[in-house]
Amino acid sequence: MATQLTAAEAQDNVQPNLLALCSTMIALSTLALCLRLWSNHITFAHRWGWDDFFAALALPFIIALNGVIIWWIYLGLGKHAATAPAEDLAKVPKIIFVGAFLYDCSISLPKFSVLFFYRRIFETTSRWMTIALWTVGAMNAGWLVSALVSTIFQCSPVNAAWETVPGSICIPQWDWFLGTALPSMIIDLCILIIPMPILLRLQAPLARRMKVGVLFLCGYSVIVISIGRLVSIAKAGPHLLDDINWTTINYMEWLLCEGPISLVSVCLPNVFRLFKRASQDGVRGMLPDSRGGSKMVSSDTNASRKGQFIRMEDRPSHSPKQMEGTADAVPEEGQPEQDRQMVGTAV
């Protein structure tokens, strides 16, 4: 930790930038989730699933993590540690300890959401897809459990993680950060790769296949953030915490972006579907869909249900020409129509 500063270093202050970043990430992730939930709500055919649950569950952890970082900014993050009171510096290790739990959940829950989204639209396409989804899901669950356990027991005794305890033993902080960042990036890369073989085999014009591929690539652009965080750790090296309020800034900027961008990524297909409805129907496209509820089951389809609202599973099968615009999005006829159209309507 630096104890002597030049006059210029004593004036260094990026706290306004960090506060703006925290506020932006909270607003962006909250807006993305709200648009996703509203898009699902107004879509008559949408089936609520585990992908929606994990997306919604991630937001409280993202907000809480940003709240903890804002508290750290109040204590001196964004300035050199030598300019902060000793009592404020003493609270920083506890902030890092608590923030680690929130961070681990904020980046792993969106991964579960995107995996369940893949399962919703891709699982029945082939056996290898099912195996891949379960394998990567197990990797993500294992990463989360190991990250939480290693956070708790990074020191012996446990309280040595945030206060000085004579004779304590702790995992070096840089090794710990690197040990959690690298597996997380590998999981992100696996999630990005999983749908690519199916997308490359889509029976659709090249332009449409490229659009769908770009959607998935943009939808999981968090891999860029994950790589950026890993590079920042490697670049800082063991000196990451030397000036704890200053040398951690670059790492914290990547960390603050990863959870929110992950959540935005898993919400993109739903948000694009909402925007497409709005572009086609204007304000009415943003309102709850009454079209499904106004259609009755025809007597020749099922006389016993005459007068009831039609459900997606009751909808008569479409001719190949009618399905031409949606079947190319996901190559599986056995899946519900709303799942086949999840990607197709976005592009």
Image (spheres, rainbow, N blue to C red):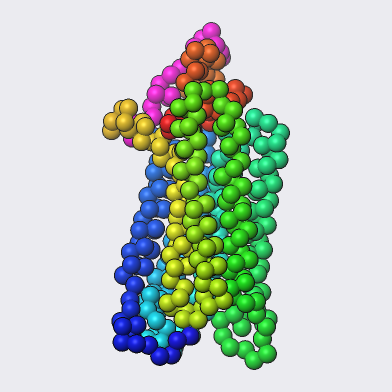
Q: Residue at x 51, y 72 (%)?
A: 236
Q: Is residue 299 magenta?
A: yes
Q: Is residue 41 magenta?
A: no
Q: Nearer the viewer, residue 215 or 60?
A: 215
Q: Residue at x 50, y 29 (%)?
A: 209
Above or below, 86 relative to 262: below
Magenta stretch: give its range. Answer: 284-306
On the rendered structure, is 173 left or right of 324? right
On the rendered structure, is 21 left or right of 342? left
Quadrant occupied by the C terminus: top left
Q: Is residue 236 visible?
A: yes
Q: Residue at x 48, y 48 (%)?
A: 221
Q: Nearer the viewer, residue 2 or 268?
A: 2
* Residue found at the far left of this picture: 283
- Residue 336 lies in quadrant: top right
On the rendered structure, is 287 left or right of 120? left
How many numbered marks have been drawn onto this rendered protein structure?
0
Measuring from the top left, give residue 127's x and y in whole percent: 71, 33
Measuring from the top left, give residue 285's x and y in whole percent: 33, 31
On the rendered structure, is 43 left or right of 331? left
Q: Residue at x 52, y 69 (%)?
A: 235
Measuring from the top left, give residue 341's x and y in whole percent: 49, 28
Measuring from the top left, give residue 104's x and y in whole percent: 56, 62
* Residue found at the far top of this picture: 300
Above or below, 218 relative to 226: above
